Image (cartoon, rainbow, N blue to C red):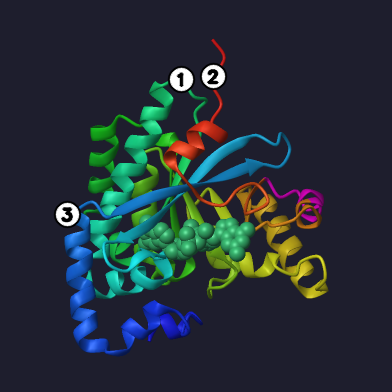
Amino acid sequence: YYAKEQGLSCCRFAEYMRTINIVRFELENDIRRGIVRKEFFIEYQPQVNLCTGKMVGLEALVRWNHPVRGLIPPSEFIPLAEESGLIVQLGEWVLRTACRQNKRWQDEGFEPVSVSVNMSVRQFRDPSFTEKVAEVLTETGLDPRYLDLEITESMTMDQKWAVNQLVELKQLGILVSIDDFGTGYSSLHYLRKLPVDRIKIDRSFLEEVVQDSSDAVIVSSIAAMANHLKLKVTAEGVENKEQLEFLKRQNCHDAQGYLFSKPVPALRLEQDFLVKAAG
Ligand code: C2E
Ligand code: MG
Ligand code: MG
Ligand code: MG
């Protein structure tokens, strides 16, 4: 039913999902095996500073190259990985791989950019999560200021827990962003208490921001509030120049979207987007 929920009922994968119980079990095993057999890989999507036009960051987005079913998007396997708990293992792999890759690029003389990694609620709830992140940083040698962890509003519902966890994480020197902002339930009052660096305005508000005046008000309010709270603000899903111009007028700092690039494999990113540092 995940596939259906996502409006993908016409595709092959949804058919596959119909015989749900057997298939669910099978798919879980597939994920488990896929991790071992290295069927997962990461694509990186540029994040661009709106003042300078320079790429300042990357978002790491996991993909699955299934041996039989081909390329499966995260919307179709992340929910199942979450439910089965396999997301913890997969998420750690993504984190380690993205950090290692980013460090390698810096060592190769490219201008440093931050890498954003999506966290699942299971990872965030793990009491030893900070330790695991610290381990990955030590192991890969990545300077913590170039790692950004993306959490969602729903992960911060238990405020006391979330604040503690975030304070611990922030002590590592990393960045924390709130992803898909505006789609959750957090009040502004609530946001003020969370030690985060950045909010990412959800793509759904950008879609019609130029045509729809209420979307425009939402986006400009989020940007104004973020500026007021001294948080950085990134817009997701920017697809055209009109959206870009609108965002610039709202003092939105960074943007991410197809206008700049779709998520691309590491090699493409290196060839087309990364810049050699001077000297
Ligand atoms: P997200 O974190 O909000 O990532 C942004 C999604 O928007 C990506 O979809 C990206 O390809 C898409 N996108 C970016 N720019 C545009 C645009 O201009 N137009 C449109 N239409 N779409 C755009 P993707 O890669 O399919 O990932 C979907 C979601 O899966 C992510 O949403 C994230 O929540 C989850 N995800 C991806 N990788 C991971 C991971 O490693 N761990 C966890 N826990 N979740 C992940
Ligand atoms: Mg994200
Ligand atoms: Mg996300
Ligand atoms: Mg998002």
Residue 248 colored in magenta in the image: yes
Determine whether, in the image, residue 71 is placed left or right of residue 140. right
Viewport quadrant of the C terminus = top right
Please rate how many residues cluster around mark 1, counting C-alpha atoms within 10 Å: few if below 14, some from 14 to 19, many from 20.
some
Q: Earlier in the sequence, mark 3 or mark 1?
A: 3
Residue 223 x %, y %: 70, 56
Circle 2 is placed at which residue position? 277
Occupied quadrant, residue 74:
bottom left
Q: Earlier in the sequence, mark 3 or mark 2?
A: 3
Residue at the location (72% across, 68% down)? Answer: 218
**Above-or-below relation of 31 to 248:** below
Q: CA distance from mark 3 to mark 1?
A: 31 Å
The residue under label 3 is which amino acid type? Val
Q: CA distance from mark 2 to mark 1?
A: 6 Å
SS for dot 1? loop
Residue at the location (26% across, 50% down)? Answer: 93
Circle 1 is placed at which residue position? 109
Residue span colored magenta? 245-253
Circle 3 is placed at which residue position? 36
SS for dot 3? helix
Determine whether, in the image, residue 253 is placed left or right of residue 117. right
Determine whether, in the image, residue 244 is placed left or right of residue 44. right
Residue at the extreme front: 68
Occupied quadrant, residue 139:
top left
Viewport quadrant of the N terminus = bottom left
The residue under label 1 is which amino acid type? Gly
Q: Is residue 163 visible?
A: no
Q: Earlier in the sequence, mark 2 or mark 1?
A: 1
